[in-house]
Amino acid sequence: MYAGGIPIRKHLPGLLPTIAMPLLDHKREMLISLWLGNRTRTAAHWDLPQNLACVVAGRRKFTLFPTDQIRNLYVGPLDFTLAGQPTSLVDLEQPDFERHPCFREALEAAETAELGPGDALYLPSLWWHGVSSLDEIGAMVNFWWRDGQPPHLTPLNALYHAVITVKDLPPAERDRWRVFFDHYVFGDDGDPAEHLPENARGILGRRTPELVARVKALLARVLSR
């Protein structure tokens, strides 16, 4: 049994003065959450925000995998999940290597950490991690933050769209789209709009609330057809 992700500012504001986090800028916009439970286990998953996980009571074991191990983690559906995040189907405690043979390679890249009360662990954005509570009673406080904004526009939305628009294209055409994404999104060739005046860069221009609103309206019109 556990109560997970309880927003402290909303439900336990009186606790905030007692959990000041000197490792983070207190002016940074953060979500601070409390987790309470007994011997629970969380399947390997990733989170969009960066996370500083601080154990308050009991011991917790973290198993971490770099982002690129997605190919070896046998991830379940992207859009049909128990708690909002896609999760690995592999049981970290008793992996079935007949069903999930590539998981052996993931384990070679894995890192583990056992935390006790007072310990903290930094989890980078998009790193896979599974968590096991090792004692009868466990409590943890998480400090979540993002460097990218706004939080309700996430790259996962773009991934959903790309899956249904790009994945099943003919291979040659898909490879050409890869060139476009590398050029415009990942910046493999530098600034793709460097040769354009600022007022003619359109969606490639400086990100402003007005630009975001305009692109959202454009996508809403297209997707509603």
Image (cartoon, rainbow, N blue to C red):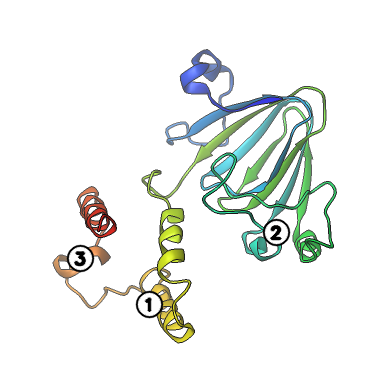
Depth check, mark 2 against mark 1: the one in front is 2
- Label 3 – label 1 distance at C-alpha: 17 Å
- Please, what secondary structure does the residue beneath circle 3 have? helix
Image quarter of residue 138: top right
| Residue 150, placed above or below residue 18 | below
Labelled pair 2, 1 in contact (Cβ < 8 Å): no
Q: Nearer the viewer, residue 4 or 15?
A: 4
In the rendered image, residue 73, in percent from the top left (x then y), is placed at 70, 59
| Residue 17, placed above or below residue 70 | above
Please name the amino acid that badge 1 sits on.
Phe
Q: Residue at x 72, y 33 (%)?
A: 119
Q: Name the image quarter holding the N terminus.
A: top right
| Residue 209, placed above or below residue 223 | above
Depth check, mark 2 against mark 3: the one in front is 2
- Please, what secondary structure does the residue beneath circle 2 have? loop
Q: Which circle's residue, 2 or 3, is located before the other in the chain?
A: 2
Please name the amino acid that badge 3 sits on.
Gly
Residue on which the image places disc 3: 202
Residue on which the image places disc 2: 73
Relative to 197, 121 lies left or right: right
Q: Residue at x 64, y 56 (%)?
A: 75
- Label 2 – label 1 distance at C-alpha: 28 Å
Q: Which circle's residue, 2 or 1, is located before the other in the chain?
A: 2
Instruction: Identify the mark at residue 26; answer none if there is no mark.
Output: none
Residue on which the image places disc 1: 180
Q: Residue furthest bottom?
A: 172
- Please, what secondary structure does the residue beneath circle 1 have? helix
Q: Name the image quarter holding the C terminus.
A: bottom left
Q: Which circle's residue, 3 or 1, is located before the other in the chain?
A: 1
Q: Residue furthest top?
A: 14
Q: Residue furthest left?
A: 199
